[in-house]
Amino acid sequence: MNNKWVYLFKEGSKEMKSLLGGKGANLAEMTNLDLPVPGGITITTKACNEFYKNNKKLSEEIVEQIYEHIKILEIETGKRFGDIENPLLVSVRSGAAISMPGMMDTILNLGINDKSVIGLANKTQNKRFAFDSYRRFIQMFGDVVLSIPKYKFDYVLDDIKENKNYQNDTELTKEDLEELIETYKKIFVKEAGIEFPQNPNEQLLMAIEAVFNSWNNTRAITYRNLYNIDHNIGTAVNIQSMVFGNMGATSGTGVAFTRNPSTGEKYLYGEFLINAQGEDVVAGIRTPLQIYKLESIMPDIYNQFIEIAGILEKHYKDMQDMEFTIEQGKLYMLQTRTGKRTAEAAIRIAVEMVNENLIDKQEAIMRIDPKSLDQLLHPTFDLDTQRKAKPIAKGLPASPGAATGKIYFTAGDAVKAAKSGEKVILVRKETSPEDIEGMTMAEGILTSRGGMTSHAAVVARGMGKCCVAGCDDIYVDEELKIFIVNNEKISEGSYISLDGSLGLIYNGVIKTVEPGISGNFNTLMKWADDFRRLSIRTNADTPKDAQAAINFGAEGIGLCRTEHMFFDESRIFSVRKMILSDNISDRENALEEILPMQKNDFKEIYKIMGIKPVTIRLLDPPLHEFLPHTDDEIKKLADSMNINLYLLKEKANSLHEFNPMLGHRGCRLLITYSEITKMQIRAIMEAAIEVCKEENIDITPEIMVPLIGNVKELKYLKDIIVETAEKVKNEKSSNIKYLIGTMIEVPRACVTSNEIAEIADFFSYGTNDLTQMTYGFSRDDAGKFIGDYKDFKILDSDPFQSIDTVGVGSLLKTSVKLGKQTNSKIKLGICGEHGGDPESIKFFNEALLDYVSCSPYRVPVARLSAAQAIIQER
Ligand code: PEP
Ligand code: MG
């Protein structure tokens, strides 16, 4: 049997999307539901691929099948394609399996020519309508098939309107239109170098080829690259007999959604135009009317449309986006598809559809894109205002949300301005832990360097604060307090706006709207909780973060980074004294000053978390981050420590490292400065014991050691930890229990996990460092080339954002297996940035971890993703 390249609408169904494209499959489905759909045919996506194989020519077989099917359409409609008296006119529209802006869209009224326009005028007794249809066709065909710019036609139309003082196209007379057609044909010859084709068969084949060619135009290719759509799936072509919305006052055309796509509210939402063809609504030439107004103009049609909308929504069990045309008082459906919607609408629709028994809870959970929840958790720009503004630069969308404020270039200046009541954006080349206060006080953060796991990005996400990172479009001069973009100087105190979800930077102020968590959001999250197996913890190291995470449903803290607590302005001085002192007793004295503050931090966090588990990680940052930078800082320190300025400088220099990320940090620091370890254990234990007594609860502190690569490192520290903890328990007469575990973030730790698990109560995978060390990509510098790697298809995604399941993932799985071999009860979690990434969460679920830990604002994302992982497994 021959290949079947062409289908009648009634031969298809909604399941045949990959062959018939989305539009074709849904037209088929509506036809089979007996809805009023004008007859038509679909040329398959396979024919598109065949067209490319055949050097961009339609094969004879395909052309033959097209004509055969057009014959069937002629019988159905009682009209003939190319007939002079009673011509069949058709629309030609593209339609891939996935809807794709950038491809050819629509040609209407195809089949009309100098002769049949008269036939159409006679048949319809409406000369104006016939000529209007013809002039529209010449313009659309010229534009879409031969790339003649639309404005060349529009100029002539505008001239006539201006000369005759018309406001609307509808005022054009049949004589005007006749004149217009002649001029359009001249423009056509001049621009295309050929006469306007009078033969309808020729028109049709040229249009079909144009659709197929548009599959590979630059815009379409770029779009597919952006959304990872296969370049080989091809597009279908739909040819449908025309119905006319431009036949006078009883005709019209419109688009509508079965529910409001912004809010999700259940009512028919859309607009229409009387006496118009489809493109008039979209092109915004005339202002359309709200759909509810149709009720008073054509009540029967309105009621019929409401009924059809209801049938479609029930049938598809989802909100529909529909196109319709009314021809002389008769309604026709031209398209239906699942409507695009905001996150807020998606949640409301999913929850309400469960309540309406249209879908079940699993389906509701699966319908929400976890990443879209970001829209609900951060302030966003007012869309209308943003649309009108033009970005001045683009960086990495490091932390979603929107922020507007005056720019400051140091944390100190930012803090000062914020304290005086200004809204502030902190602009830095890159941030460091010392900028924390400035970052906390800022509305948003902009850096010119660093990737998605740079300090700025991680901290900003943790704070739920908008951040654009690694924006190399701008040059930041922190000394002059300016940044330069497109040769323009933007100085301290100027207003800018950041879109952290898109990585865009704007000049001036863009209005923002605050997020609101609605009841439906809560309902959906609770449903998700019933499905998931993974627990969701959070990475939080301040009471504020801990509280935010609890509000979003966190079940514990998986990572409390204690270095933040050392960098507090009021403490850094004592920390520096401790690091730079020559002898243990000076060091212990300095630590004595820090102990009460650190203990207090822990107490506050324990109070908020109650009996929920809290994993506190011992100190991890590279040593040099503690060092004083300015001469003034060094002098103050030397005075206070009573030592020579130059000796102190020398000591500070000696601590400099060439590769700090692989240097003196983590457990290495805790081993060589065991006083720090002891002080931190004391702070943790005393805090826990005191809160247990004060709140009358049982807390089991989880103490975590960072950066273990060799079991002996852990053994060494564990002895110190146990000794100190037992001492504190004795002093306080407490029998509190505590756990000692380790981060697994060094490849050597993964492959020796059997040894490590023997002396660890838990593992927490630090996938940031594990990715860094497995790939050998510096966390802070990889942003510079990962973009290229993605463009060249070496990487599908940034491995610091979405876990590299093949490499890093197999190390993780190896570690899980080895760890369970020697310690079947070991608790397993992950606290790298991947803990909030939906794709990675699927992997962690499959790897049988017990929990994921992510920044507070990603907790809802993780709750939903963990539920989706289970549902998908089923
Ligand atoms: C990690 O490495 O994944 C981790 C959580 O630790 P940090 O980011 O603090 O190095
Ligand atoms: Mg780490």
Image (spheres, rainbow, N blue to C red):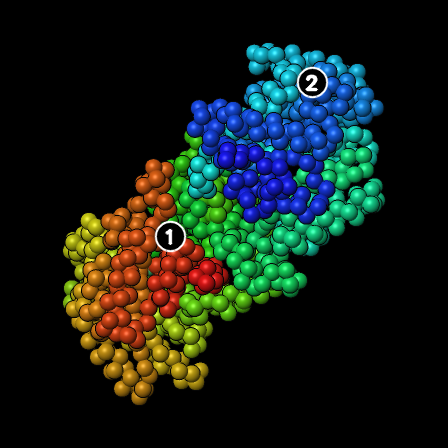
Q: Is residue 276 above or below residue 638?
A: above
Q: Secondary structure at mark 2?
A: loop
Q: Secondary structure at mark 1?
A: loop
Of the pair 831 and 282, the residue shown nearer to us: 282
Q: Is residue 489 visible?
A: no
Image spot of residue 231 (x, y percent): 44, 36
Report whether 187 appears left or right of 597: right
Q: Residue at x 20, y 60 (%)?
A: 748
Q: Nearer the viewer, mark 1 or mark 2?
A: 2
Would you call the spot at circle 2 few (<14 residues within 10 Å), some (14-19), or many (20 or more)?
A: many
Q: Is residue 17 above or below residue 182?
A: below
Q: CA distance from mark 1 to mark 2?
A: 56 Å
Image spot of residue 181 (x, y percent): 71, 16
Question: Label for residue 113?
Answer: 2
Of the pair 824 and 376, the residue shown nearer to us: 824
Q: Residue at x 82, y 33 (%)?
A: 249
Of the pair 195 and 546, the residue shown nearer to us: 195
Q: Is residue 199 visible?
A: yes
Which residue is the extreme one toward the bottom? 733
Image spot of residue 125 (x, y percent): 83, 24
Amino acid carrying mark 1 in the image? Ser
Q: Residue at x 50, y 25 (%)?
A: 59
**Which residue in the structure is indicated by mark 1?**
802
Quadrant of the rendered image containing residue 80 = top right
Quadrant of the rendered image containing residue 232 = top left
Contact check, label 1 and label 2, Cβ < 8 Å: no
Amino acid carrying mark 2 in the image? Asn
User: Does label 1 or label 2 sit earlier along the sequence?
Assistant: 2
Would you call the spot at circle 1 few (<14 residues within 10 Å), some (14-19), or many (20 or more)?
A: many
Disc 1 CB within 8 Å of nearest ligand 1 atom: no
